[in-house]
Amino acid sequence: MSQSLVVMETPEPSVLRITLNRPEKRNALSAALLDELRDTVRDAAGNPRCRVLVLRGNGPAFCAGLDLQEVSIAGGPERSARALAGVYEAICLAPQATIAAAQGAAVGGGVGLLAACDFVVAADDLRIGFPEVHRGLVAALVTALLRRQLPDRVLRDLLLLGQTIDAADALRLGLVNRAVPLDRLTEETQRLSGQVLQGAPVAIARTKSLLDTLAPRPIATDLVHALRYHLEGRDDSEAAEGIAAFLEKREPSWAARLPPPPQ
């Protein structure tokens, strides 16, 4: 019997804890995991007894991003990208308050899971990485989320340089809300959940909807736009070289090229 890729628990009334469950792959986001996660969040969104969604990862890492071995096969890139966009949209539009409890590492698409949540509680061992440009990829879907949260200069520094930052820097930049010792991660997440439960559920849902409405465009619209950039970049020869180099554990060889003209 195969293990569930997403584990659900109710540690206390009104709180649903959702755990990514591929610890042997550092919770890399396969299409199957993404489908299961999206359906879990959507089901919870329709449950009036559920007030808080907590997202976490099983094992030493929160999430290593998209499963690059899977997306390197025919048909894999588009399916994974569309599934990832669906997960981000489901989390962003959930009426419940959403909390990511992250430890170890959040990389690439895993950073998007953090950014999609209303709150992020980070363990002090967390490292947040943006390696896409080093792999010939465009962090388009993640950017659609982070563009609402970070100043332009900060975002360029992280994305164009492919930086990795620690929990303290993430807190300083506003990528996370709390940074605590690893052994206090669960305790702090529970404390934050308790604070959320003091608010009225419909008022919280309406406030979340208002925040989305006040943005230049709804998040669903931004994700559609970003998905096009993601797929165009993924079909490029640079992506093929970058992913091959990553899987073969070598440095990529970039050809001198001009980008295509904007559409």
Image (spheres, rainbow, N blue to C red):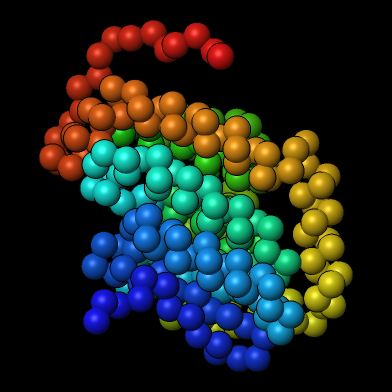
Asked whether the viewer can see residue 177, the reply is no
25 sits left or right of 58 in the view: left
Asked whether the viewer can see residue 216, the reply is yes
Q: Indicate whether 151 appears above or below 123.
A: above
State the image coordinates of residue 150 (x, y, percent, origin top left): 64, 42
Q: Residue at x 44, y 59 (%)?
A: 34
Q: Indicate whether 146 appears above or below 177.
A: above
123 sits left or right of 207 in the view: left
| Image quadrant assignment for residue 253 | top left
State the image coordinates of residue 68 (x, y, percent, origin top left): 28, 46
Give the total number of marks visible in the rendering. Answer: 0
| Image quadrant assignment for residue 33 | bottom left
Residue toward you, 203 or 167: 203
157 sits left or right of 245 in the view: right
Q: Residue at x 61, y 58 (%)?
A: 90
Quadrant where the N terminus is found in the figure:
bottom left
Residue toward you, 21 or 170: 21
Q: Residue at x 74, y 43 (%)?
A: 218
Q: Indicate whether 208 appears above or below 5.
A: above
State the image coordinates of residue 16 (x, y, percent, origin top left): 58, 80
Quadrant where the C terminus is found in the figure:
top right
Q: Residue at x 44, y 54 (%)?
A: 110
